[in-house]
Each structure stands twice: as structure tokens, then as C-alpha cells.
Amino acid sequence: MGAVVAAAVLGVLGLVAVAVVATSVGPTAVPLAALLALVPLAVVLATIAWVDRWEPEPLPALAVAFGWGASVSVLVALVVNTGAVEVLVALGTGLGEASAVGATVVAPVIEEVVKALGVLVVLLAWRRSFDGPVDGLVYGATVAAGFAFVENILYFGAAISGSMGLEDSGAAVATVFVLRAVVSPFAHVMFTACVGLALGIAARSPSPTAWLLALPTGLVAAVGLHALWNTTAVRSSSGGFVAAYVTVQVPVFLALVGLVVWLRSREGRVVRDRLGEYARRGIVGPAEVTHLSSLGDRRRAQAWARANGGPRAARAMRDYQRAATVLAFQAHRVHLQRDLDALRDEPALVAALAQARTRLRATLTV
């Protein structure tokens, strides 16, 4: 119930954030800007779903993470960033330099801090669902996706309203779209992922206060990457920006992709090792361990079930695979001594796996 209320409140605040953006770019520009912003959002959310294949996070937690990014993070950033520029101008700094300082110094700190607080809120509220680095990355990316979505509405809307009536009215929009949706759709994800990964590592610790050290560590990396990105965009020539993008941003992004792939394979090993323990106890069979610890085998198993029992069998196969995965990760929390109370849940999870297996067999025609 609390998650529903929180998501609803954040949804309302998200609408407020969009309304504030509309006052800046003009309400007529917002609908088209929102449609354009959906393109990079869809790419990012699809990628997050791909990362979150082994043990999908609870939808309420993901909704709160996205809502925080799209509302609280945006509103705080709009107020503080704009206020900082106005203060600098009042102190005698030229508008151009004040805007540059706001973008390269103020924005990276404020935006990453408030986004990090959203990831922390999810960690503290959904402690038992926040299992490790992959979960942290998923929640960090989801917060960032919400923030980037509304920010893209602002940038696309500014391009649309600023070029209305001009001969090259589409040029500004096309340029901003390429920069925001093609060149850098994962920029905010990459920044906030640093915090998510740090908090995810802390979540593996049996200490409930490990996040106190992990949060500032992740923040330093997030703010550093964000400041570097904004500085090359604001202070460099077009050639300098391209050079920095190719030599720094792309390698960092590829390193993050490599880390994600490695972490996903590591989760497969967790499933294999923990279910292997249950195989030695006779709860699952060795063949089950083999197919359940490979995403490729899982897809093939679902296709086989569909061919031999239709959609109902395919759903039953997915339910069976999900039950096995929940059992494996619950056992892993106990193995890490992170959640010893989870041991009490084992009988119910073992029974749920047996029931899922029985339902699966009942749907098959072979």
C-alpha cells in the first residue's frame, strides 16, 4: 500500500515537473517533445529489462525509482540549477559564464546527489529485493531514465519552440534529437549506475550500514563522469567534443557494458551453484540445474513448452523458472549471511517450486 501511495505522489510531482518545463518551452511544444523523448526512453527501458532478466525487480520498486527520477530529481535540479545561475549573475558573472559554471559544476553535483537519494530510498525500502550490483544498476538506471525523460522533454521542447517559424525549423530539433537520443541516450544511466553499483555491492554486506561508505564512493564517480561530460559539451569546440566522446565516453560506456555482461553471467553462476545444493538434497534434478542456469536454455525450454502445450504451458514454464530463481537467490542471501531470516522462507519457496513443477507437467501434452 505504501508503495502505491508513493508512486501516486511521485506521479503527481512528475506532472508538476512537466508543467514547469512547459512554462519554459511553451505548452504547445510539450506534446511533440514528449513523443520524441519516448524514443530514447524506450531504448533505455528495454536495456534495463534485458539486464534484469534473472530476478526481475518488483514493479512497485521500479515505479518509485522511475517516479523519483522524473519528479523529485527534476524539480530539485530545475530550482537549484536555475537559482545558482541567477546568483552568479547577481554577483557580477556574465550570463554565458554563469550558465557554463551551472552546467559544469552545479548541475553534476545537484543532479547526481538527488538521483542517488532515489536509489538509496529504494535500497532502504526494498532491502530484501536489493540483492547486489545488478539490482543496484537496474534501480540506478531506472531513476536516471525517469530524469532523462523529463529533461529530454525540456531540451526537445526548447528546440521546437525556439525554431518555430524559421526556415530551418527542423534542423534544431534534428540536431538535439541526434545528440540526446542517438549519441547519448545512456549518459544519465551511466552516471547514476556508479551509485547503483556501489550501493549494490554494499547490499551484499551483512552490515546494514555499509551503504554509508558506498554512497559517497559511488557519488564521486557519478559526479566526476557527469562533470566531464558537461564540460566537454560546454567548454570544447565541436571537434573537441567529438574527440572526448570517442576517446573517453565511448570506452567508459563499453566498459560498463562489459561489466553488465559479466555481472549477468555471474548471476547465472549463482543460480547454478545454489540450485546445485538443492540437487544434492534431491529437491531438483541435475538436468533442471543445467537448464535453469542458462538464459538460452530457459528460452528454448519456453519454446518447447509452447510447442507441446501452447501458451498456457509456456506461462507455466516461466512460472516454474521464476520460482526456481527466487529460491536460488534467497539461498544466496543466506549463503552470504546477508539475510539469515530468509532461511525461514525456504520451506515455502521449496513448496512453491514443487507446485510450479506440477502445474507445468499438467499443461504439457507429452
Image (spheres, rainbow, N blue to C red):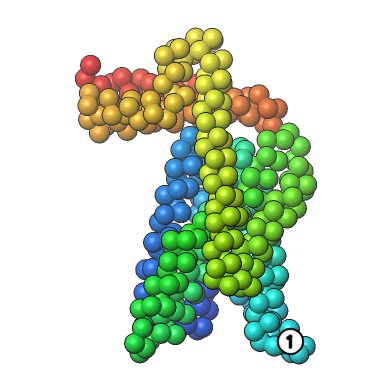
Secondary structure, mark 1, is loop
Residue 316: x percent and y percent? 33, 29
Residue 287: x percent and y percent? 41, 14
The front one of 284 and 51 is 51
Residue 223: x percent and y percent? 68, 60
The front one of 12 and 197 is 197
Count of marks placed on residues: 1
Q: How many residues crowd mark 1 within 10 Å: few (<14), some (14–19), many (20+)?
A: some
The residue at 54%/46% (across/down) is 254
Judge whether residue 296 can be spotted in this image: yes
Can you say whether 50 is above or below 20 in the image?
A: above
The residue at 63%/29% (across/down) is 333
Q: Is residue 10 left or right of residue 92?
A: left
The front one of 252 and 329 is 252
- Residue with the mark numbered 1: 93
Residue 245: x percent and y percent? 56, 59
Q: Which corner quadrant of the image does residue 314 belong to?
A: top left
Q: Is residue 44 left or right of residue 194?
A: left
Q: Which corner quadrant of the image does residue 127 belong to?
A: top right
Can you say whether 159 is above or below 300 in the image?
A: below
The residue at 44%/63% (across/down) is 181
The residue at 47%/66% (across/down) is 179
Amino acid type assigned to the residue bearing label 1 in the image? Thr
